[in-house]
Image (cartoon, rainbow, N blue to C red):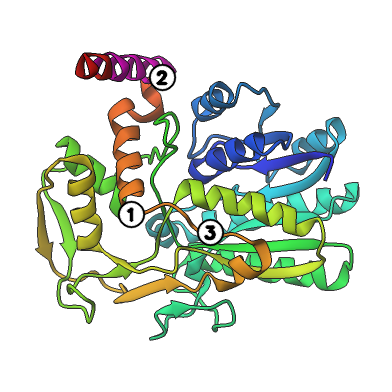
Amino acid sequence: MGKMVLLTGGAGYIGSHTCLELLNAGFDVVVADNYSNSSPEALRRVRALTCRNFPVYEIDVSCRAALEEIFKKHEIGAVIHFAGLKAVGESMEKPLAYYRNNLDSTLSLLECMKAQGVNKLVFSSSATVYADSEVEKKTEDLPTGCINPYGWTKYMIEQILRDVAAVEPDWSVALLRYFNPVGAHESGCIGEDPSGIPNNLMPRVLQNARGLLPVLGVFGDDYPTHDGTCVRDYIHVVDLAKGHVAALEYLKKHRGCEAINLGTGVGYSVLDILNSFERANGVSLNYEIQGRRPGDAAACYADPGKAAALLGWKAEKSLDDMCRDAWRWQCYNPEGYASGIEAWYKAQDTESEEKDLEEK
């Protein structure tokens, strides 16, 4: 590609891990983020891990004028678009904010790209675009349709990008449909740092393991699955990040717009996650079975065949890896990024001292 890759929302959970993997793969990056649900500390740590510097702009991607300045200052060859509000529950309470923010940021970005002749885009989409159906294994050709405003914004942006690619023959677009990202970088330096009360399973598991959440609710044990609890496709965030690197390589040689699942292709139940977490980390969780949540499907997991065929990519990390790396991140950063990078260095030093004592 020979030019810089712009990461909108590059300080977020998936964005920061992708930033790191791009730098390790030899790409030059520039990041735009307004830190509405992320921290500049994540990028500071990416610099520490990679020993590479890169420009960062604190802007709202919806602001076209601010975005244009980045395109004028740097030779952008491709964009990975992460920026956007992302909480399903919050989208139900604030639908206008979600439609305004997520669609406006995308339209501003596309207008800037078109004006500057940049035509390669990887979009951070979601498995939430698949219509509610009894088909557990999701292939990219299944019907789409959503049940919450967050999902609808992803659906609408996918359609916008298809329409653009249809009339712009030089455009190359990958719509990466994520399943359930978990885990953290194996260093424990960067990871997921949700604000407020988390809704996703792994952050709640971590809070329970730390004693911050006294009881972890398991919503339903009477689903038609192998142990009665809901089954989902959990993917290590590092595997997911590497999928973006593979997508950029694919876009160098291909035109048009492709939707591609990023998942393991394996369905893990809630109890699978809890048992793996306890086994991998030697900790006990306090959980109880509660009633089903409205709208939860029994099972949903990816068919990752298209990613393997087009991108040459497949997930490599195990469920134990996901649980072990998530817990390491939590132990090194008990207050998330608010702990500061010094806490991470201290945890590293302490662990090294403990290993030295064990060896003696």
Q: Residue at x 45, y 58 (%)?
A: 91
**Lower sequence index among marks 1 and 2:** 1
Q: Secondary structure at mark 3?
A: helix
Q: Position of residue 197 (x, y in %)?
A: 29, 45
Disc number lying in front (1 or 2): 1
Q: What is the quadrant of residue 135 in the picture?
A: bottom left
Number of the front mark, 1 or 3: 1
**Main secondary structure type of the part rendered in magenta:** helix
Residue that label 1 marks? 319
Q: Which residue corresponds to the image point at 26% horizontal and 70% vertical from the top-left?
A: 230
Please tell me which residue is depicted at 39% across the width and 37% down the height of the picture.
193
The one nearer the camera, 261 or 356, is: 356
Tell me if residue 41 can be seen.
yes
Under mark 2, the amino acid is Gly
Lower sequence index among marks 1 and 3: 3
Q: Which residue is mark 3?
A: 96
Outermost residue toward the bottom in this view: 134
* Disc ID at residue 339: none
Q: Amino acid at mark 3?
A: Leu
Circle 3 Cα neighbour tier, 10 Å, few/some/many (<14 / 14–19 / ≥20): few
Spatial separation of the CA atoms under disc 1 and disc 2: 28 Å
Q: Which residue is mark 2?
A: 340
Based on the picture, tell me whether residue 208 belongs to the magenta stretch. Answer: no
Quarter of the image for residue 120 reads: bottom right
